[in-house]
């Protein structure tokens, strides 16, 4: 990989997000669909809050989600689902999970 100091390299940085003592990590990127994160979640249980509409696509692994007391929904590789803005949701990862999440 070559190194460059062009202005686009300086302004197009990748952000690194760390949650839950490092058990959930993501990299923030800009895609053709807009802002997104590509991340991993270790097997476990987590609670997240959204500030915008989120569309999550499971790349690998299995997980369940529950939005604000509704029924649990199962998700597996290649599944996509949406979480509304300003919502709290629970996640149970049965395995380590890789995902991409698009923000609207």
Image (tube, rainbow, N blue to C red):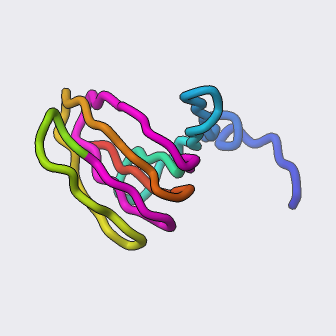
Q: Residue 6 falls in which quadrant of the image?
A: top right
Query: In the image, is residue 55 part of the stretch drawn in magenta?
Result: yes
Residue extending farthest bottom: 78
Rendered location of residue 9, percent (x, y): 70, 42
In the image, residue 15 above or below residue 57: above
Q: Residue at x 31, y 38 (%)?
A: 90
Q: Residue at x 42, y 71 (%)?
A: 77
Quick one: quadrant of the N terminus? bottom right
Q: Nearer the viewer, residue 33 or 22?
A: 22
Q: Is residue 3 left or right of residue 20?
A: right
Rendered location of residue 92, percent (x, y): 39, 46
Query: In the image, is residue 48 part of the stretch drawn in magenta?
Result: yes
Quick one: quadrant of the C terminus? top left
Q: Is residue 6 left or right of residue 60?
A: right
In the image, residue 73 above or below residue 28: below
The magenta span reads 40-65
* Callout count: 0
Q: Nearer the viewer, residue 12 or 17?
A: 17
Q: Nearer the viewer, residue 13 or 66?
A: 66
Q: Residue at x 60, y 30 (%)?
A: 18
Rendered location of residue 70, percent (x, y): 11, 42
The rendered magenta stretch, by its main secondary structure, is classed as strand
């Amino acid at each position: 990989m070559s190194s460059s100091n062009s202005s686009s390299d300086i302004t197009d940085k990748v952000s690194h997000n760390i949650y839950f003592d490092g058990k959930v990590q993501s990299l923030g990127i800009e895609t053709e669909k807009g802002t997104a994160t590509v991340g991993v979640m270790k097997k476990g249980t987590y609670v997240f809050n959204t500030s915008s509409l989120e569309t999550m696509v499971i790349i690998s692994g299995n997980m369940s989600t529950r939005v604000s007391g509704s029924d649990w929904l199962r998700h597996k590789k290649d599944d996509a689902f949406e979480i509304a803005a300003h919502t709290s949701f629970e996640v149970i990862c049965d395995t380590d999970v890789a995902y991409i999440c698009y923000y609207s």
